Image (cartoon, rainbow, N blue to C red):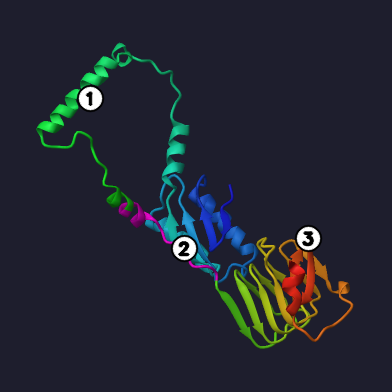
Amino acid sequence: MSLLRGRGHGLEVHLAGWDFDAAIAELTARLSERPEFYRGTRATVRYGETPLDAEQLEALRGVLAAAGIELTGVELPSAGEELARRRALRPKRELKLSDAARSLVADFAGARSDIAERRKRGESSVRRVNVAAAATSAAALQVAPPPPPGTLYHVGTLRGGQALHHAGNIVVVGDANPGTELVATGDIVVFGRLLGVAHAGAQGDSDAKVYALHLQATQLRIATCIALDEERSYETSEPEVAFVRDGRITIAPFSKAAEVAG
């Protein structure tokens, strides 16, 4: 089962089915592979069978913080998931009915007796559930979802060897020279010349786009699609946008992007 998952509003650390020490070791290894990629993101933790104690939660928070990830909430398994888990663990046994259970007379007699006792006490014949109170209690237990990833703004020219990695959108006000690298899970916008490598939708979002005033990247990536600079044999003075169409990266003037994409 995957320990670290991308979700619409950030990351989820899924501990179900994991031993805590093994999970910490695996998470540390995963984050160290790309130490800057997750910086600035938010994460929620989804407990497994047993909630974490304060010491374990602090250890997990420290591992995430070292990678620049903010822990914003925790979630317990839903009631449906917990019920399914308990049913799966329940031993199978053959159902044997007693003589009394086979007779509806005993059931009806017991029900009538219970109703009569309730009426003597001035209670309703049937228990009523306070739906509003139950809904309020359930809402109080829910953890608010974390806000969506923000946009990383960089003002100034990026020179060869510099890189920006961000879980969200990246906006550069300036040029991105050859040898630079921009990697974002969302869109990339360059108010200048884009001459380096740009990878939008890095976590698989094929709807992500790359915008630039002068789009001459040495390599373009959107999700799993790749386009190289040798595929461009012309220049234009108009801002351009790159997007995925029919499984390939397409570059079009910004003014005609909607028409081409449609």
Name the quadrant of the C terminus.
bottom right
Q: Please check the rendered image and state whether residue 47 is part of the magenta-colored stretch, yes or no.
A: no
Left or right placement of residue 221 versus residue 71 in this view: right
Classify mark 3: helix, strand or loop. Answer: loop
Comparing 238 with 215, the one in front is 238
Comparing 97 with 10, the one in front is 97
Residue at mark 3:
246
Indicate the quadrant where residue 250 lies: bottom right
Using the numbered discs, state the Cα–Cα distance from disc 1 to disc 2 in whole angstroms: 54 Å
Residue at mark 2:
61
Report crowding for label 2: few under 14, some 14 to 19, many 20 or more residues within 10 A (C-alpha): some
Indicate the quadrant where residue 122 lies: top left
Classify mark 2: helix, strand or loop. Answer: helix
Report crowding for label 1: few under 14, some 14 to 19, many 20 or more residues within 10 A (C-alpha): few
Q: Position of residue 195 (x, y in %)?
A: 78, 80
Residue at mark 1:
111
Q: Please check the rendered image and state whether residue 147 is part of the magenta-colored stretch, yes or no.
A: yes
Report the mark closest to the observer, 3 or 2: 3
* Residue occupying the far top of the picture: 99
Q: Specify the segment rendered in magenta.
A: 136-149
N-term mark: 3 or 2: 2
The residue sitting at 64% across, 65% down in the picture is: 34
Classify mark 1: helix, strand or loop. Answer: helix
Q: Position of residue 48 (x, y in %)?
A: 46, 47
Q: Quick check: can you spot residue 198?
A: no
What amino acid type should be assigned to the residue bearing mark 2?
Arg
